[in-house]
Image (tube, rainbow, N blue to C red):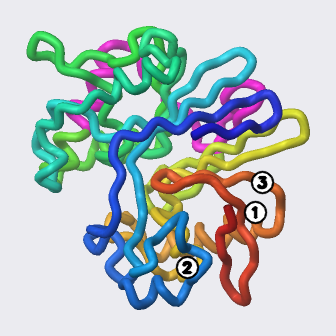
Amino acid sequence: MHWKVGKVKITKIVELETIGSTKFILPLASNEEIRKLPWLIPHFATDEGRLKMSIHSLVVETPSRRIVVDTGLGNDKEGRKVPTWNNRQEPFLETMTAAGFAPDSIDTVLCTHLHVDHVGWNTRLEGGKWVPTFANARYVFGKTEYEHWRDHRDESDKVAVFNDSVQPLADAGKADLVASDAKIGDEITLIPTPGHSPGHMSLHIQSDGEDALLMGDVAHHPCQMAHLDWSSTADSDPVRSAVTRRELFSRLADRPTLVIGGHFNGGRIRRDGDAFKFIV
C-alpha cells in the first residue's frame, strides 16, 4: 500500500496481519462494542466486530532520503512474552526487496518507540551475533526512550528486546539519540507523544503544502478514537496515553492531514460528538 504526500512517498511493508485475537492488547474492545461503531467496518473491523490490525514498517522516501519507520518483530528473536513472536522465520526482508527496498538501500531507520513489535528487524542473527540489518543506515532513537529502556531491568522480556534489537546498534556506533521534537531532514519533524511509552514519538511529514502524521502507537486501533479512555495493556502510563490521544486528535480533526497508525492503515480524523472517528 502506498500514499503520496507532496514529494514524499510512504509505502507499507507488512510483516504480520491479524483478525481478532486482540483482547490481550485492547481488553475493552469487545465485539459488541466494536459493532456499535459502524464506521470501522470493513476497513478496520469485521462485521462480527473483530479488530483488523497489522505489524508493519513504513518506508518513507523523500527527495533525498530513504527511511524505514519501525521494524516489526524480526526473526530468530527469543525471550518474547507472546509465544508466536519467538524464533520467527519470515521472509520480511525478501518482501521489502521485492517492493524495491533492498536493506542496503536504506539510509535511516527511525523507531517511534522501543517496544518488541517496533524494533525486531533492527538486527539480524549472523554467526551467532546480532548485527545491523540495514548496514548503511543510521538508527535514530529518541533519547528519552532509549535511556528509559536501557535502565529498565525489571522485566526479562523487555531486557531481551533491548539487548538483541537496540544495544547492538549502539555497540556498532550506528545509533543516534535525538530529542523527541527533532527535525529529521527537510520534510520530517518529530512530535513528542508520550504515554504508550515514556519517550514515544510521532512523525509529522510536510511537503508541497500537504502533510501526514505517522502516529506510531498513540492508538493501536481506530476504535480508540471513539473511546479515548481505552488504553492499551502495553501503555506505560494509561492516563498520559489518553491525554495524548485527545490532544493529538483534537489538533488533527477535520483537517486534510493523512494519519497512518503503527498497526492500521491511513485515513483522516473527524470529530464525532465528544470524541472522534476515522475515515478512509
Mark 1 — residue?
252
Nearest the camera: 60 or 158?
A: 60
Q: Measuring 15% from the left and 55% from the top, which residue is drawn there? A: 81
The stretch in magenta equals: 162-190
Above or below, comparing residue 133 to residue 55 in the picture: above
Q: Name the residue under label 3.
A: 257
Q: Residues within 10 Å of mark 2 (few under 14, many from 20)?
A: many
Q: What residue type is labelled 1?
A: Leu
User: Number of callouts in the render?
Assistant: 3
Q: Is residue 169 above or below residue 120?
A: above
Q: Tell me the distance, in whole angstroms, between the alpha carbons under discs 3 and 1.
A: 7 Å
Which of these two is toward me, 164 or 46?
A: 46
Instruction: Judge left or right: residue 190 versus residue 47.
Output: right
Q: In this view, does 164 lie to the left or right of 189?
A: left
**What residue appears at the point 61 percent right and 77 percent down from the top-left corner?**
39
Determine the CA span between mark 3 and mark 2: 20 Å
Q: Distance between the residues labelled 1 and 2?
A: 15 Å
The magenta stretch spans residue 205: no
Residue at image mark 2: 228
Label disc, if present, on residue 100 of the rendered structure: none
Between marks 3 and 1 in the image, the one whose residue lies nearer the viewer = 3
Whether pointer 3 and pointer 1 mark residues with C-beta atoms closer than 8 Å, the reply is yes
Question: Residue 208's x, y, as percent?
Answer: 89, 34
Q: What element carries label 1?
A: helix
What quarter of the picture does the N terminus occupy? Answer: top right
Amino acid carrying mark 2 in the image: Leu
Q: Position of residue 102 (x, y in %)?
A: 45, 14
Q: Say whether disc 3 or disc 1 marks the residue closer to the N-terminus.
A: 1
Residue at 71% in and 67% down? 269
